[in-house]
Amino acid sequence: MKHAHPMEIEMKFRIPALAPARLRLEACGFLLASAQGPELSVLWDRDGELRAQGGALRLRRYGGTATLTWKGARVPDPLLKIRPEVETTVGDPAALEGILGQMGFGPVFEMRKSRSVWNRGALVACLDEAPFGCYLELEGSPGAIREAMGQLGLEEAQVEPRSYVTLFRELG
């Protein structure tokens, strides 16, 4: 997601199904920005260099666009996922893959899921369906995330602290 500052702050919740979550998002004033559709995310690395630093380089294809995202190491927090993040839209993903390859990077992990994106002011909500379950992500300021969490009826017991990469490796 795009940010006003280069830090990603999000909380991910395991949910039983997408349909009730959609209704709750609508009832809480979220507006659909991108309809549910397939997403392909490929992680790139160079001899494990980024992974060793706790970072990642992801090329995501979703909603007819491609985005390159660099993520830095996570900042410790018991519930929130906080990490530096910089991303940009990519006009020609195949050309970018060629550039990455010439720089010594290669694809190291692929994830496929279904996603929809919702917005309410500066807060972004993503509904994801992966092979191992359904999730709702809230991304924005810590205060806005906690406020929406209460409005949406989400509880700390539903928080999924693992990344999608970890979940795909363990469960996918």
Image (tube, rainbow, N blue to C red):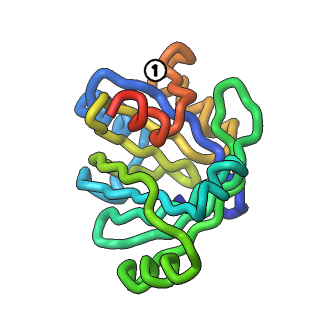
Q: Is residue 107 left or right of residue 122?
A: left
Residue depicted at x 69% and y 38%:
142
The residue lying furthest to the front in this view is: 47
Q: Residue 22 sits in which quadrant? A: top left
Residue depicted at x 30% and y 65%:
63
Residue 64 at x, y = what percent? 29, 71
Q: Note whether 50 is above or below 150 in the view shown.
A: below
Residue nearer the viewer, 47 or 140: 47
Number of other residues with Cα within 10 Å of mark 1, as a class: few under 14, some 14 to 19, many 20 or more: few
Residue depicted at x 46% and y 20%:
153
Q: Note whether 65 is above or below 133 in the view shown.
A: below
> Could you tell me if residue 77 is visible in this image?
yes
Q: Is residue 25 left or right of residue 70?
A: left
Q: Amino acid at mark 1?
A: Gly
Residue depicted at x 30% and y 38%:
130
Which residue position holds label 1? Answer: 153
**Kind of element beneath mark 1:** loop
Residue 28 at x, y = what percent? 43, 36
Q: Note whether 61 is above or below 147 in the view shown.
A: below
Residue nearer the viewer, 150 or 102: 102
Q: Quadrant of the C terminus?
A: top left
Q: Note whether 156 is above or below 42 in the view shown.
A: above
The residue lying furthest to the top in this view is: 157
> Could you tell me if residue 2 is visible in this image?
no
- Tally of numbered discs: 1
